[in-house]
Image (cartoon, helix red, strand yellow):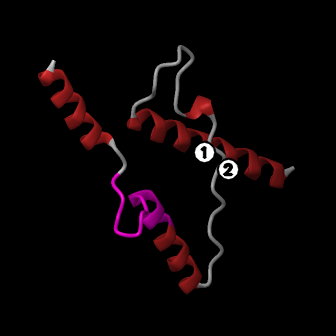
Amino acid sequence: MRGIARRVHRLEKQFAPHLDDQGRSIADVIRERRLRRFAAEGKEPEPELARRHEDYFDANGRPLTIAEIIRNAHHRRLQQTTTDVRAKHQ
């Protein structure tokens, strides 16, 4: 039983979100840096896309891998730009 508890503790430590001294996750830090960089360059930041359940899970409820999530997001962005270009030309 102690071995199982030790393994669970190691898994929790490995997969728990790591926070910095100010309690921010790495994603928050990266997001803030991007916003500051855009502001310094005088650009408007890109709007964040709404996160949907379908973006992270397949039809059977299985969590998608990171590669699948990135591939799906790229495909969705490509479809969006294609429809935007077609709408401009009509």
The amino acid on which the numbered mark 2 sits, given as a three-letter code, is Thr
- Which region of the structure is painted magenta? 18-31
**Residue 78 numbered mark, or none:** 1
Picture coordinates of residue 5, whole percent (x, y): 20, 26
Residue of label 2:
81
Q: SS at mark 1?
A: helix
Picture coordinates of residue 82, whole percent (x, y): 69, 46
Image quarter of residue 9: top left
Residue drawn at x 43%, y 63% is 24
Q: Is 44 left or right of 70, judged from the image as shown?
A: right
Image quarter of residue 30: bottom left
Position of the N terminus, as image quadrant, is top left
Residues packed near mark 2 inside 10 Å, few (<14), some (14 to 19) or many (20 plus) = few
Picture coordinates of residue 37, whole percent (x, y): 50, 78
The vertical placement of 49 against 37, above or below, is above
Closer to us: 54 or 83 = 54
Closer to us: 2 or 30 = 2
Residue drawn at x 53%, y 13% is 60
